Image (tube, rainbow, N blue to C red):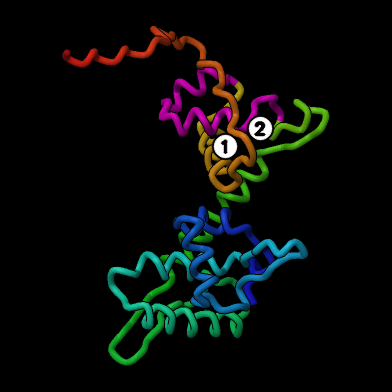
């Protein structure tokens, strides 16, 4: 069993690592495409997926335009059995699956997933939730900057330079990780109120354009 096998992810985290919508993560479980050894339910019946499952999820959906569902499922079955039998680093193994005339290399999917797992770990390490800091609001470590405010600026399309000007204590890397964290951990409940515009922003007008009068 590989070293990251013990790491489990929520369906949303798995979707971000595998680069697929979260509905596809749930679908691959509901339709029994993913072997049961790669996911489980906790005491609250919430699904948890082992990190290695993300490579198979990514492969299944990204190869959909080239391979049939049966071919993809067979590949996952063969690769998952090999994964359980192998020891040591996953990335050091050869992940070429051969069946008659069909040859499939899963290594690119495994590399991509491990890179994004590393990004997820870095994003999680960046964020702190402390009751003594802004009432437990998730903030970027060593600051009082709410991570979701930074992520909202990224989602709004603001240039990184403008975000850094508004939050001088951050780096470009921290901005990227904040957005990654928010994607993997979407806020629950009511949406946050819009944050104040970054320094230098000017609101020209808040009036809506009136409807054109209908011709009589």
Residue at the location (69% across, 35% down)? Answer: 138
Residue 131 vertical position relative to residue 125 in the rendered view, above or below: above
Q: Which mark is residue 178?
A: 1
Magenta includes 152? yes
The outermost residue toward the left is 215
- Residue 171 on image: x %, y %: 55, 29
Q: How many marks?
A: 2
- Residue 10 on image: x %, y %: 62, 57
Residue at the location (66% across, 32% down)? Answer: 140
Judging depth in this view, the residue of 106 and 49 nearest the camera is 49
Judging depth in this view, the residue of 209 and 99 nearest the camera is 209
Magenta stretch, residue numbers: 142-168
Q: Which quadrant is the C terminus positioned in? A: top left
The answer to whether residue 107 is left or right of residue 38 is left
What is the secondary structure assignment of the residue under circle 1? helix
Quadrant in the picture for residue 142: top right
Residue at the location (55% across, 16% down)? Answer: 196
Q: Which residue is mark 2?
A: 140
- Residue 38 on image: x %, y %: 60, 73
- Residue 34 on image: x %, y %: 52, 75
Q: Give the CA distance from mark 2 to mark 1.
A: 8 Å
Q: Residues within 10 Å of mark 1 (few under 14, many from 20)?
A: many
Residue at the location (56% across, 21% down)? Answer: 195
Residue 133 vertical position relative to residue 202 in the rendered view, above or below: below
The answer to whether residue 95 is left or right of residue 190 is left
Residue 119 vertical position relative to residue 164 in the rendered view, above or below: below
Query: Is label 2 in contact with label 1 (beta carbons under 8 Å)?
Result: yes
Can residue 115 be seen here? The reply is no
What is the secondary structure assignment of the residue under circle 2? strand
Magenta includes 205? no
Q: Which quadrant is the N terminus positioned in? A: bottom right
């Amino acid at each position: 069993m590989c070293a990251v096998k013990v790491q489990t992810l929520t369906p949303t985290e798995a979707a971000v690592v595998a680069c697929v919508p979260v509905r596809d993560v749930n679908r691959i479980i509901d339709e029994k495409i993913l072997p049961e050894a790669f996911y489980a339910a906790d005491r609250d019946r919430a699904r948890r997926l082992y990190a290695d499952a993300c490579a198979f999820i990514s492969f299944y959906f990204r190869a959909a335009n080239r391979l049939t569902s049966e071919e993809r499922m067979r590949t996952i079955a063969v690769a998952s059995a090999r994964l359980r039998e192998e020891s040591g680093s996953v990335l050091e193994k050869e992940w070429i699956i051969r069946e008659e005339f069909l040859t499939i290399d899963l290594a690119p999917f495994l590399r991509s997933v491990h890179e994004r797992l590393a990004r997820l770990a870095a994003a999680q390490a960046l964020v702190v939730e402390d009751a003594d800091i802004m009432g437990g609001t998730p903030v970027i470590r060593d600051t009082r900057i709410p991570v979701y405010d930074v992520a909202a600026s990224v989602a709004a399309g603001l240039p990184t330079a403008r975000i850094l000007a508004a939050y001088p204590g951050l780096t470009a890397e921290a901005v990227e990780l904040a957005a990654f964290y928010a994607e993997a951990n979407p806020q629950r409940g009511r949406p946050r109120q819009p944050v104040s515009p970054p320094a230098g922003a000017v609101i020209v007008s808040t009036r809506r354009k009136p409807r054109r009068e209908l011709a009589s």
